[in-house]
């Protein structure tokens, strides 16, 4: 009887907080759980991969760290299309027009694949030249390994464009369980292949390349099966799959271009940071890579609230429910904070055990613990709004502000202040992280003020559906 009373109270509270005319709290929960598991699986497996690579020494970790921003630059180009497509597909779902949903989905798929293939060509043809242009001061051993990893990563991007496009469509229509399935397939495959090639066969960086290519090929095949053959959620025809609709394309690009440019310039900023971090030494680069890998695990569950916001807020906007969109914008921030606090309660007691998986030197261990412990209060206070609210704004079609503001903060605070503190003032790695903490603070203030205004909700990506 007592349990029943607790359930009734919880039901009333969740109904008041999360239920509305578009969704019930049960539907929100059913979408949230797979998104959380999806994000956690990605980050945890990413952490394990980094740990496997670290067993080959600091040069391998540093090589992967230097290549990461370059490949991310290419991924950002087609991820921008995918993000825009997710918003437009979600808004089309709000209009309850199946033909528009399928046409928008088809357009997202072919456009994402096309942009991805074109973007990765320079890395396929001139991998070493790209690295020498960006990191002329890199140690020769690091440069050799980075060249191998960059070329292999470029090949893996080709099937990854297919995976990303289909994943974006599924997220837009709210198929969170299928998104989770695909994420588990590609990430578990990556982990298994990495164990085989890195642990068993001891192939070092070449083994990482094999694992990445094979996992992404498998992920692309699984995504195609899920969307087209296994209880397909969208009724595709060949005409709809390769549809060209100017209005839908314009709506997609309205979100994709600002978001894509933000991600591109953000990645360029990471490359610039990598250039000046080379002067801090291989130990600092390896420490930063490990600490960021663990930070990704810490924020993985909370980051799923952003994916939830795109689906939920986008559908509310498509249905013309502005007040619902605002309410869910606030709710997703609270969900992010709750998930972050729960994760931190488990993460920090386990931090020594997690760090040991990377086989760090005593100095790397000490520096990693220091930056992660100092990060906690700033993380809880400012990370949820600074990283969840931009998804809410974009889901309503307000694309320019979050992108321009994010870029301004990144270049002025993360890059400019980071260089000043770490190199010019001699604070080293801690100066890089101080600029990160301040950037979370500034982003929180900017996005909170934007959300309190009215302009963002007026900018629905689909005209006439706002």
Image (tube, helix red, strand yellow):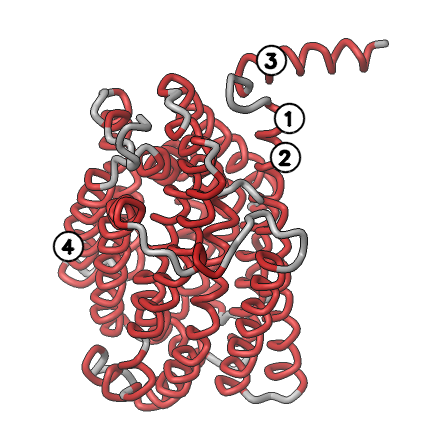
Marks 3, 2: nearer the viewer: 2
- Label 2, secondary structure: give it: helix
Instruction: Please report whichever mark, 3 or 1, sits nearer to the chain's N-terminal start.
Output: 3
Residue 21 visible at all: yes
Q: Do the residues labelled 3 and 1 touch (CB within 8 Å)?
A: no
Eyeballing the image, is 3 above or below 309?
above
The residue that mark 2 highlights is: 30
Q: Distance between the residues labelled 4 and 3?
A: 45 Å
Of label 1 and label 4, which has the lower sequence position?
A: 1
Q: On the image, numbered disc 4 is attached to which residue?
A: 416
Q: Which of 208 and 326 is in front in this view?
A: 326
Question: In the image, 129: left or right of 366?
Answer: left
> Residue 320 in the image: x percent, y percent?
37, 23
Q: Position of residue 388 (x, y in %)?
A: 39, 37
Question: Within the image, what quadrant is residue 71 found in?
Answer: bottom left
Spatial CA distance of label 3 from label 2 is 17 Å
Q: Where is residue 336 in the image (x, y as percent from the top left)?
A: 48, 34
Q: What element carries label 4?
A: helix
Label 1 belongs to which residue? 26
Distance in Å between CA atoms under marks 2 and 1: 6 Å
Determine the CA span between mark 1 and mark 4: 45 Å
Q: Does residue 356 show up?
A: no
In this view, the mark in front (1 or 4)? 1
Up the image or down, 287 lies above or below 321; here it is below
Label 1: element kind: helix
Question: Are the two marked residues, 3 and 2, in contact with CB atoms closer than 8 angstroms?
Answer: no
Residue at image mark 3: 13
63 and 431: which one is in front? 63
Disc number lying in front (4 or 2):
2
Task: Answer whether labels 2 and 1 touch (C-beta < 8 Å).
Answer: yes
Position of the N terminus by quadrant: top right
Q: What element carries label 3?
A: helix
């Amino acid at each position: 009887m007592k349990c029943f009373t607790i359930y009734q109270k919880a039901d009333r509270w969740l109904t008041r907080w999360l239920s509305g005319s578009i969704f019930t709290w049960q539907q929100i929960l059913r979408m949230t759980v797979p998104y959380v598991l999806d994000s956690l699986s990605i980050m945890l497996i990413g952490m394990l991969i980094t740990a496997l690579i670290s067993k080959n020494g600091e040069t391998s970790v540093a090589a992967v760290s230097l290549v990461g921003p370059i490949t991310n630059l290419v991924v950002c180009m087609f991820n921008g299309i995918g993000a825009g497509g997710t918003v437009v597909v979600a808004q089309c779902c709000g209009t309850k027009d199946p033909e528009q949903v399928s046409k928008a989905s088809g357009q997202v798929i072919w456009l994402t694949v096309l942009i991805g293939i074109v973007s990765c060509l320079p890395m396929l043809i001139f991998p070493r030249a790209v690295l020498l242009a960006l990191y002329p001061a890199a140690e020769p051993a690091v440069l050799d390994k980075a060249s191998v990893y960059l070329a292999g990563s470029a090949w893996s991007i080709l099937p990854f464009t297919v995976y990303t496009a289909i994943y974006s469509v599924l997220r837009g229509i709210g198929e969170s369980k299928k998104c989770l399935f695909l994420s588990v397939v590609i990430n578990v495959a990556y982990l298994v292949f990495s164990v085989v090639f890195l642990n068993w066969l001891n192939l070092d960086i070449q083994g990482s390349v094999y694992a990445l290519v094979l996992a992404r090929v498998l992920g692309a095949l699984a995504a195609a099966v899920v969307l087209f053959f296994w209880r397909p959620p969208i009724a595709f025809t060949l005409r709809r799959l390769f549809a060209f609709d100017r209005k839908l394309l314009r709506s997609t690009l309205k979100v994709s271009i600002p978001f894509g440019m933000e991600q591109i310039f953000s990645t360029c900023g990471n490359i610039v940071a990598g250039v000046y971090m080379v002067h801090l030494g291989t130990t600092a680069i390896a420490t930063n890579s490990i600490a960021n890998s663990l930070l990704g695990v810490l924020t993985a569950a909370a980051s799923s609230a952003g994916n939830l916001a795109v689906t939920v807020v986008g559908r509310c906007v498509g249905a013309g429910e502005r007040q619902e969109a605002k309410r869910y914008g606030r709710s997703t921030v609270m969900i992010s904070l709750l998930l972050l606090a729960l994760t931190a309660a488990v993460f920090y007691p386990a931090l020594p055990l997690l760090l040991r998986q990377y086989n760090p030197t005593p100095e790397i261990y000490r520096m990693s613990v220091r930056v992660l412990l100092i990060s906690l209060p700033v993380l809880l206070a400012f990370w949820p709004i600074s990283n969840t609210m931009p998804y809410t704004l974009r889901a309503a079609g307000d694309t320019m502000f979050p992108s321009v503001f994010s870029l301004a903060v990144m270049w002025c605070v993360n890059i400019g202040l980071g260089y000043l503190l770490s190199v010019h003032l001699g604070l080293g790695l801690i100066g890089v992280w101080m600029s990160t903490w301040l950037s979370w603070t500034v982003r929180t203030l900017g996005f909170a003020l934007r959300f309190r205004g009215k302009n963002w909700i007026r900018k629905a990506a689909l005209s006439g559906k706002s």
